[in-house]
Image: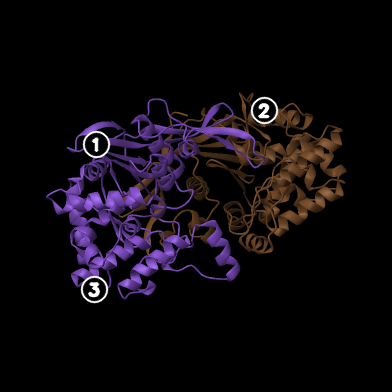
Chain colours: A purple, B brown
Amino acid sequence: MAGTVAMVEVWRGGMAESRHRGHAVICDAAGAVVESWGDPGAVILPRSSVKMIQALPLVESGAADAAGLGPEDLALACASHEGAPVHVTRVAAWLQGLGLSEADLRCGAQPTRDPAERKRMLIAGEAPCQLHNNCSGKHAGFLTLARHLGAGPDYVDPGHPVQRAVRAAFEDVTGQASPRFGIDGCSAPNFATTMHGLARAMAFFAGARADAGDARSRAAARLVEAMRTFPELVAGEGRACTELMRAMGGSVAVKTGAEGVFVAILPDRGLGVAVKIEDGATRASEAAITGLLVRLGVLDPAHPAARRRLGDPIRNWRGIETGEIRLAPGFA
Amino acid sequence: MAGTVAMVEVWRGGMAESRHRGHAVICDAAGAVVESWGDPGAVILPRSSVKMIQALPLVESGAADAAGLGPEDLALACASHEGAPVHVTRVAAWLQGLGLSEADLRCGAQPTRDPAERKRMLIAGEAPCQLHNNCSGKHAGFLTLARHLGAGPDYVDPGHPVQRAVRAAFEDVTGQASPRFGIDGCSAPNFATTMHGLARAMAFFAGARADAGDARSRAAARLVEAMRTFPELVAGEGRACTELMRAMGGSVAVKTGAEGVFVAILPDRGLGVAVKIEDGATRASEAAITGLLVRLGVLDPAHPAARRRLGDPIRNWRGIETGEIRLAPGFA
């Protein structure tokens, strides 16, 4: 991962105390690089930033319609949710509708990140279950597709028909063969691609149309529409994806991924954006995507959701301003 | 902060998914650079890694003895503790012995990071106070010195006699004038120095002797001895400083600092070590100092405390191995 550039700085005491490097690519609907920082050819694991790609086979196969899924379910299929009651109860109902249960999931139990629910569960002595896993919606989507295909229960196996379909869709929209995969936090395979491939895939989603002749384009348009319509289901209160999508009035879909990945889909502009912070820091990927969205003219830099990621002072335990997060000179 | 080198990599799926760059310097007791990676001249904010320097005036002024402080108190003065009952009750008793209370602290209230205490306080509806702040021992030390000097209550003001004494000691042991300072998370000034300056200061502590003619050397030796004797007071159960000092049988003192800083003091070898990760990541500073301590022959790489920072597989929510943290080629 050579060829990174400085993208985000953390200032304190009049100096850059820490610095984050990375790559960023903006692609147009034709798949061409409009602008880039770092190396567009760098191979990365996109992690949860590609959940909308992983949901393509669910929709284009007809599995989603056959199961009667609504846009809320599709938003959850694309989500890294915080395991709040609104997410957990919806995924539970989705599974129940399939005649399945939490035990059929393969994502593993993860503590809820919703503060009120966390406190309630702690006091009640309730253990988290797989429904609380931030990927439980994606996995409900995998189960829905597996059932539709008449395939077996181990849907996270890279050789399972569900993952083979995900890989085919992934390679199609990134425009590249995936050189390898890693096992994600939720146990599903996560296919590698280049920065250019990831931005191109997001540009494909940006150019997707509900009335397209191509089933993949129609599926992509439905998923983007679901994300933009239900930003609270894609992440949760206080989370960057939810707050930034709301701040842009639903005109842009954005999605975070672990280890410093962030993507944006701009349907009105036909643009796709991909960010990877070399060191994996979320504070930096959030600041970088905020800076790029401001640069592209779709996010007001004075909006509180933007300022919380880029602009607001950092305060210490006594509320004293100690520094701030800035874009590095030359980036965005 | 140019001239960083790759120091730590996070692997997944057979590739380096993320990479951390930084600087590292090993100094001998004469202050010479024995070995370095990155730029020894890089200016950094050392954050909590220099609490033993900030405690020098407390000891060498005679304030610690006048207040009857024991080695446990001195360990707490050098600590970034997790606010467990063992830390909170000791600092409270220390303040009470001075005729002071929690309200005299200037570090701000911080939630405890001790899981059991956190749960207990959540259920009881108890709010954290300044005693839980990871710096409360350092601040008790500042208050002790302020009282000894007959100085005013605002001991975190950079012009206060306590901070003037800290700055003088800091510049002496780093061997450099400090070019600037930042306000730390605990509201105290944190003086900048170079990587070489920080490593030289740690080498001074490594060479300090309890029977030295110089009061500063005697004070440094007492502080190192306190840290090595009470590792659980310097951080807490499960924390890197505590676990690594125990793993080395108390032969080496180590201390973490925010934003990717870690230092080590090797009295038997007369060496000081300083690490700064450019992006501020704790996982990387812990892995890097572990690698350096192994390289220096003072830490067994197979010890669980070492392996938890460098060597053990990373597992996901289902316990499946997904990757590992490695040293970058060419580092340590």
Judge depth for marks 3 and 2 and give the one in front.
3
Residue A235: where, in percent of width, then height?
41, 52
Marks 3 and 2, Cα distance to the nearest angstrom?
67 Å
Label 1 sits on what residue type?
Cys
Q: Position of residue B39 (x, y in %)?
A: 47, 30
**Quadrant assignment for the C terminus of chain A:** top left
Q: Give the chain of mark 1.
A: A
Element type where label 2 sits in the image = helix
Residue at horizontal 23 percent and vertical 71 percent from the top: A147
As helix, strand or loop, the secondary structure at mark 3 comes to loop
Q: Amino acid at mark 3?
A: Gly
Task: Say which of A169 and A72 sits in front.
Answer: A72
Quote the CA–CA distance across marks 1 and 2: 51 Å
Label 2 sits on residue: B171
Of the numbered discs 1 and 3, the one sitting upstream in the chain is 1
Compared with B172, B140 (above or below) is: below
| Residue assigned mark 3 | A152
Q: Quadrant of residue A321?
A: top right
Looking at the image, residue B163 sits to the left or right of residue A145; the answer is right
Tell me which corner region of the image, top left, top right, bottom left or bottom right, holds residue A272: top left
Q: Report if the CB atoms under discs 1 and 2 are less than 8 Å apart.
A: no
Would you name the residue on which mark 1 appears? A27
Report how far apart the C-alphas of labels 1 and 3 lie in the structure: 37 Å
Can see residue A159?
A: no
